[in-house]
């Protein structure tokens, strides 16, 4: 797990390439540690300035790109496309540029001795207001719904932060997280005890449940960012969704409303997917999630794999996760290796049955079609 050239350890200037949600999560800590020369993004709507740093297109930034280390703030196909464009300029991966997850995993460890992760997701309930046939967390296929208690979550995060020095984003989801009675209490606990180890806490919701006043108060206090997936083009709940948006905005809680019309069809568990790829390792790395799962005192490269087993649909093998309860403090880098897909088993076993989110999955379906 030493991909970056030694020159990265000596740099104090970087260029950030690809501006969006990942960039905003990483920006505060990067500002502490680097002189950010510029932000590159080819979308004219994003160009301008962010916190005093110019955002410009790649065409006008050639000299900047060729004279500075570049952190690419994207994953999956977008990262591949940006990497290809940088190679055409004569730049080399992990020497001149690298992915944000590789950078976070290696630079902070080699330079500061910090074990850092980009984004970690925890499902706090598997109850939901919808029954989406192709739900990526497989919610309609649970025989028994799952609700985690605060004590279970507290124990898990206390254990987790024995091994991890910093997480750029903790995302709490479900199911529908606003159905969980412990959401506010858990956010408060993370904020009070681990604010120095977490950049931002996200809540990922479909917006169909208006959060109560106490949860709103706690989210505002802890600067929580709420992502709302809008499925109102398929499911008739727009008035409730707008109530949620209005309540969040009224209380100065930042929320991002995302109109999601299409999903990748994983195939699993409905049918065997058609996977076009050379092997399972390549298939997994094409999927390449930048977020990873933390549930049941285990850390997962793929959160879907956790949910498949939790729902009773699949039995994972040992290499598909890292068990925190069995981990020695001297082995904490196993979490980072898992996040980078460098597990002993080479790939997550569920990859054989799951079409994944990568470009090799050509099956696109309408989002949020309800299961009968």
Image (tube, helix red, strand yellow):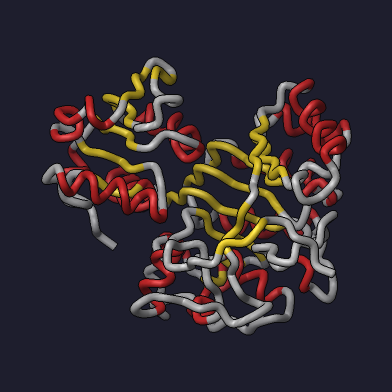
Q: Position of residue 190 (x, y in %)?
A: 66, 43
Viewer-nearest residue: 217 or 268: 268
Q: Position of residue 91 (x, y in %)?
A: 15, 45
Above or below, 309 against 209 in this view is below
Q: Position of residue 259 (x, y in %)?
A: 65, 41
Above or below, 37 against 195 in this view is above
User: Residue, x 65% and y 56% (percent of image)?
Assistant: 122
Q: Quadrant of residue 302?
A: bottom right
Q: From where the camera sits, is residue 252 visible?
A: yes
- Drawn side of residue 327 relative to residue 112, left or right: right
Above or below, 164 against 329 in this view is above
Viewer-nearest residue: 225 or 240: 240
Considering the image in quadrants, where does the N terminus appear?
A: bottom left
Q: From where the camera sits, is residue 334 visible?
A: no
- Drawn side of residue 94 relative to residue 50, left or right: left
Considering the image in quadrants, where does the C terminus appear?
A: bottom right
- Drawn side of residue 257 relative to residue 12, left or right: right
Viewer-nearest residue: 370 or 313: 370
User: Residue, x 71% and y 43% (percent of image)?
Assistant: 230
User: Residue, x 77% and y 50% (percent of image)?
Assistant: 234
Above or below, 186 against 136 in this view is above
User: Residue, x 59% and y 82% (percent of image)?
Assistant: 272
């Amino acid at each position: 797990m030493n991909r970056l050239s030694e020159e990265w350890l000596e740099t104090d200037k970087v260029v950030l390439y690809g501006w969006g949600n990942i960039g905003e999560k990483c920006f505060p800590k990067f500002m502490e540690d680097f002189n950010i020369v510029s932000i590159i993004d080819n979308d004219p709507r994003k160009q301008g300035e962010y916190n005093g740093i110019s955002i410009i297109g790649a065409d006008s930034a050639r000299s900047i790109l060729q004279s500075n280390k570049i952190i690419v703030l994207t994953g999956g196909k977008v990262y591949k496309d940006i990497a290809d464009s940088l190679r055409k300029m004569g730049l080399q991966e992990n020497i001149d540029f690298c992915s944000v997850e590789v950078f976070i995993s290696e630079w902070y460890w080699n330079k500061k001795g910090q074990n850092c992760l980009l984004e970690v997701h925890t499902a706090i309930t598997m109850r939901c207001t919808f029954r989406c046939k192709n739900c990526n967390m497989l919610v309609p296929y649970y025989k028994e719904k799952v609700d985690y208690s605060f004590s279970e979550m507290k124990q898990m995060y206390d254990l987790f932060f024995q091994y991890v020095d910093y997480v750029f984003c903790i995302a709490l989801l479900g199911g529908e997280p606003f159905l969980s009675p412990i959401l506010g209490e858990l956010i408060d606990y993370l904020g009070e005890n681990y604010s120095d180890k977490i950049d931002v806490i996200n809540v990922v919701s479909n917006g169909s449940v208006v959060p109560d006043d106490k949860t709103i108060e706690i989210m505002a206090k802890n600067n929580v960012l709420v992502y709302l997936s809008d499925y109102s083009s398929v499911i008739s709940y727009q008035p409730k969704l707008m109530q949620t948006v209005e309540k969040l905005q009224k209380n100065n809680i930042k929320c991002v409303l995302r109109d999601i019309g299409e999903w990748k069809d994983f195939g699993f568990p409905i049918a065997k997917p058609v996977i076009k790829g050379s092997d399972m390792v390549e298939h997994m790395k094409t999927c390449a999630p930048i977020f990873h799962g933390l549930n049941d005192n285990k850390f997962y490269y793929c959160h879907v794999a956790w949910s498949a087993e939790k729902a009773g649909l699949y039995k994972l093998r040992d290499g598909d996760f890292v068990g925190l309860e069995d981990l020695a403090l001297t082995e904490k880098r196993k979490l980072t290796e898992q996040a980078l897909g460098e597990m002993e088993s080479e790939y997550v076993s569920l990859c054989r049955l799951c079409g994944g989110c990568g470009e090799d999955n050509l099956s696109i379906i309408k989002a949020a079609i309800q299961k009968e």
